[in-house]
Amino acid sequence: MGPVSCFVASTGLALLVGLEAAAAELHDAARQGDLVAVERLLAGGAQVEATDSGGATPLYVAASEGHAAVVARLLAAGGNTRHQVFGFVGSIGTPIHAAIRHGHLGVVRGLLEAGVDPNLPDDGVGPPLHTALRNGQTAAAELLRSFGARSIQAEPVDALIASVDPAAGEETASACAVCHELARHPEQPRAGPPLWDIVGRSKAGIPGFEYSEPLRKLGGRWTYEDLSSYIANPRSFAPGTKMEFRGIAEPRRRAALIAYLRSLSDEPKPLP
């Protein structure tokens, strides 16, 4: 390698080391809420989307620590509000989820005012409202609702239920059987309520079973449409539910499962 090549290589390495050092400093400044340092580092070219060893961006770190002014500055610099941090079993959420978990209402409000979707989906931890309710953050839940957080209905599959083979849903139901009894006469209690005669049954309708408050508040009976929404994404349809199942997005597979659940009855309800 000639002198020029050595110079270019060493310069590139130095630049890389410098960027990594600036990114580490930006994370530290975000963690400490040091707005002056954040301004200096951003002006010097520190990358707002750089991640630390845990996969967190400076925005995620600042949101976790509750530093609203730093969050606002990082948003202005282009911080990604949808960046997900991943743990051992999947996503642990975005900056707004982190702020909610720690009860940082000022940060939550700032993110919502900046345009973050109050119903932002997350395949690991569910929407922000679910995170708030599962973590007992009632003030955050009310704030989210004031910005439009709500129960989300899935695409109806009523038209498909009559055309699918219930047997196709039986395999999917075997996963449900981990927490729910499928037989008419349950052998032993399980974590979830039995699914026999679920179609048309009152929500939270099994006496003595400890349903979550969000599920009790839904009220009414399990219609085909509501079953479809709950199975599609329990945490979006009933934020705060105890059921952490991520859901079945594909309509035909969902319809097959509902058709099979309908068959679990001495007198199956009429098809929709």
Image (cartoon, rainbow, N blue to C red):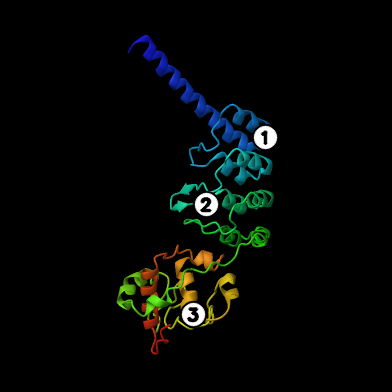
Residue 196, picture quadrant: bottom left
- Distance of mark 1 from mark 2, alpha carbons? 24 Å
Going by the numbered disc 3, the residue's amino acid type is: Thr
How far apart marks 1 and 3 lie (CA) works out to: 52 Å
Badge 3 or badge 2: first in the primary sequence: 2
Circle on res. 223: 3
* Residue named by callout 2: 93
Q: Can you say whether 97 is above or below 37 in the image?
A: below
Quick check: 125 above or below 215?
above
User: Mark 3: few, some, or many residues within 10 Å (few <14, many ≥20)?
Assistant: some
Q: Residue at x 50, y 47 (%)?
A: 85
Residue 121 placement (x, y as % from top left):
51, 57
Residue 35 is tagged as 1
- From this viewpoint, which residue is outermost toward the front? 159
> Residue at coordinates 58% horizontally, 50% vertically from top-left?
98
For disc 2, the neighbor class at 10 Å (few under 14, some 14 to 19, many from 20) is: many
Q: Secondary structure at mark 1?
A: helix
Q: Which mark is residue 244?
A: none
Q: Residue at x 31, y 73 (%)?
A: 168
Helix, strand or loop under label 2: loop
Residue extending farthest to the top is 3
Residue 66 spot, x, y in % from top left? 65, 45
